[in-house]
Amino acid sequence: MEKSGTTFTGTPELLLPDWNPSRPRRAQLESGLRTAIREGRLRPDTRLPSTRALAAELGVSRRLVVDTYEQLTAEGHLVARRGSGTRVAPQPPGPRQPAPSHPAEAGPQPGVIDLFAGAPEPALFPRRAWSRALRRAVETLADSRLSYGEFGGAEELRLALAEHLGRVRGAAVEPNQIVTTSGYQQGLRIFCQLVRSRGGRRVAIEDPGYPIAAWTIESEQLDAVPIPIDDRGIDVDAIASGDVDAAVVTPAHSMPLGVALAPERRRELTAWARERGALVLEDDYDAELRYDRGPTGCLQGLAPDVVVLAGSLSKTLAPTLRLGWLCLPGDRVTEAMAQRAAFDGGGPRFTEIAFAEMLSSGAFDRHVRASRQRYRAKRALLLEAVAKVLPDARLKGIAGGLHAVLELPPGTDEKEVIAAAGRAGVKVQGLGDYTLDHPRPPSLVIGYGPPSDRELQRAVAVIAEAASCARR
Amino acid sequence: MEKSGTTFTGTPELLLPDWNPSRPRRAQLESGLRTAIREGRLRPDTRLPSTRALAAELGVSRRLVVDTYEQLTAEGHLVARRGSGTRVAPQPPGPRQPAPSHPAEAGPQPGVIDLFAGAPEPALFPRRAWSRALRRAVETLADSRLSYGEFGGAEELRLALAEHLGRVRGAAVEPNQIVTTSGYQQGLRIFCQLVRSRGGRRVAIEDPGYPIAAWTIESEQLDAVPIPIDDRGIDVDAIASGDVDAAVVTPAHSMPLGVALAPERRRELTAWARERGALVLEDDYDAELRYDRGPTGCLQGLAPDVVVLAGSLSKTLAPTLRLGWLCLPGDRVTEAMAQRAAFDGGGPRFTEIAFAEMLSSGAFDRHVRASRQRYRAKRALLLEAVAKVLPDARLKGIAGGLHAVLELPPGTDEKEVIAAAGRAGVKVQGLGDYTLDHPRPPSLVIGYGPPSDRELQRAVAVIAEAASCARR
């Protein structure tokens, strides 16, 4: 290591240990010197060899060395002082940061069966159709649309979505009431901004409910107010008496209980919202997946003036697409669009147009129909497996979505079952993981989207064993 | 229109004016009834025809009508009361929202030449290469990676980016110090969160600078502190005496002035950051586009412990891809990753992997090289056109990026030139649009990315005419 304040006297091999004259020399010299400085082989204040000397040593043109010194001087790595040649800059290089280990991510662990609630079966993803639709979008999009703009989403998508949501979800929505999102998480944030911009402070959420909702609402400087759910859905009286300015609900299939919001409560909820001047976010996350009948029409269709409908592709196609939407009351669209732009500059047009194409061509409808058939069978398999090995447990919730709640026999310790299942290679969450203030009987939340049939059967067997141990 | 409280007595044509027996009947009946309720043809409390009667009138099975009534009852549109048949729900349907007109968006206006600074020439976008890379990503991504997760970005991309940024930008970054973003706008928000979470309150920004920065910083509950720029870049003394906790800078090519941050100021800035415990955001938005020499290495390479490097594809490929990244000090990565997940659930993996593939295959390097050649020529054309028709004006800034600042002859009214150019079909911004507290001589910011050569020449002629009128 070269002492600072002196002239570098080592050989070029010391300075540039990886020098290879047959590779591009300029890039090598530049990055080699940078690395030497950063790694401390060239200390602060060390004088570099003259350009003439180094050029001769390396067998390169002097011009190349001069240019490189100039470049590194412009970057601040070197200083050129009249009369004292070129030196390494006096400031010591910053401490190299320790590489952090990655935080736990939802990646797969080999051999572990993950009953995560809320992801589709990956094998169903229509790769060919998606790839084709994307390709057409990339090849045909007008030049002018490669830039910024269209902050509400690509026009094709807003048109196709308005038609689709009207037909399939009974939504009352015009194309220009749609703002696309990068998924529900961003949609919830935009909703929070809409609530806050009108002076709202408190947002009712379902308890149990989507675990990230409370945290997200609070990080948007609002208070989340947990409201209990019974078998007719969220307790609307409790919302009305809760002094809240907004409510976030899952009317078609409550997350995670799987309850549908009862008709009279739908009316009470929208009546409350109108009277209070409150906004309701309808998280319509998996409503298209209903196996016993057609999907219940959405709340937004009943009250498009006070309900914001939020949907995404995360349950029907794949979470990694990061594409969702909000359908907004007409007087909130501009604000939501501006907020989307402020968050991230709007959506990726190729992805949006690919989905519009899948909607228009009928490919998406076909995919959802095929998915329903598959999940209907999977759900039946789950019911059967539970009936066989866990006769004391009850599978709850309507026949829809990608998960069901397994109510364990009374007295079973939920956490103990989860831990025991985990030790046997089955990752599953309990209702406790979704609950804030209103505890419920011991239950597991079984996501049957990702696992294969065989894995699902094995997982139920493992859970049965774990539950029986937890009661012994 | 049916009076409420009575039985519907109209013909089926009145109830379902669009009924077409050869189209799917169930969907028609459902959506037809919903529409009739929403549009007020079926008033609240009106009793519907009996299922038997309606089935006979329409020539469909009674079962279909029963199912449909049940469906609409579950949705809250209808109420079934024992003994009084099925009625429209009592609550009046919400007022239909007026469709808002779209706010002005950055879409193209026919016949207008837009000199927007900061977008590439769309014809350069490598559609074939991008389409191929995307297709490979869609076809080969592992099933398990279609779900949530990898909140720092796809592993392939972090690997390829770390190599690329080290080689091309002189960055000191390991793959696990990278967090992908949906572009600079989101990256700036994540940076603000990092500043705030350590108690920071004030953020220095360049003046003139990126116009949305101040607004974004303030919407993240921080104060933006405008710091003047001279021909050696941002005034680091003013930062140091400004009582700020962070700084957002464009060292390679200041936006919009086009100045490179001088070597000694780079050292002063990082020394200040270390002493103060401040964080610096290096907005490296267009640094790869340098036409007179290799790009200046990044500030982050000098001080990876205090500098966050932000880059994106918006200047090299296309803004609509919405893909960018942050390179973070090791001890801030986990927090940035969590914040990305909190904002929008992470990045779209297909897009990320497609870009990783373009990096690894060399296709991106080739594209950037070809782009440089094209922009070098375009910039020369601009210089020539200005010299010819605007000899009193000066084109400022280093030879890089996608814009240049045209300093108008002293005494010219900037706003008047902009207005006159606009009337003649040339949309251009003035330095005033980028300036907060530190006014400068009258100047236009000429983005030469999007327009064709011919458009660029015409735009300069229009500006010359406008400038000469504005001095008359």
Image (spheres, coloured by chain):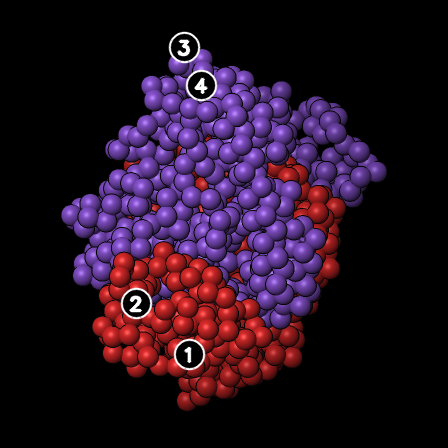
Chain colours: A purple, B red
Chain of the residue under the numbered disc 3 shown in the image: A
Q: Amino acid at mark 1?
A: Pro
Residue A166 appears in the figure: no
Chain of the residue under the numbered disc 1 shown in the image: B
Chain of the residue under the numbered disc 4 shown in the image: A
* Image location (x, y in percent) of residue A81: 56, 40
Quarter placement of the C terminus of chain A: top left
User: Compared with residue B48, is residue A245 higher up or lower down, i.e. above or below?
Assistant: above
Q: Nearer the viewer, residue A207 or A462?
A: A462
Q: Amino acid at mark 2?
A: Val
Q: Mark 4 — residue?
A: A467
* Image location (x, y in percent) of residue B298: 55, 44
Q: Mark 3 — residue?
A: A472
The disc placed on residue B77 is none
Q: Nearer the viewer, residue B301 or A84?
A: B301
Camera-side mark, 1 or 3: 1
Quarter placement of the N terminus of chain A: top right
Q: Nearer the viewer, residue B443 or A451?
A: A451
Q: Using residue A125 as the reference point, say whether residue A305 is left or right of it.
A: left
Q: Mark 1 — residue?
A: B12
Closer to the chain start, of discs 4 and 3, is: 4
C-alpha gap between disc 1 and disc 3: 64 Å
Answer whether labels 4 and 2 touch (C-beta < 8 Å).
no
Q: How many marks?
A: 4
Q: Using residue B111 as the reference point, say whether residue B1 is left or right of it.
A: left
C-alpha gap between disc 3 and disc 2: 54 Å
Q: Estimate how packed mark 1 is, as few (under 14), some (14 to 19) or many (20 or more) residues with alpha carbons within 10 Å.
A: some
Label 3 SS: loop
Q: Mark 2 — residue?
A: B88
For the residues tagged 1 and 3, is the chain the same? no
Label 4 SS: helix
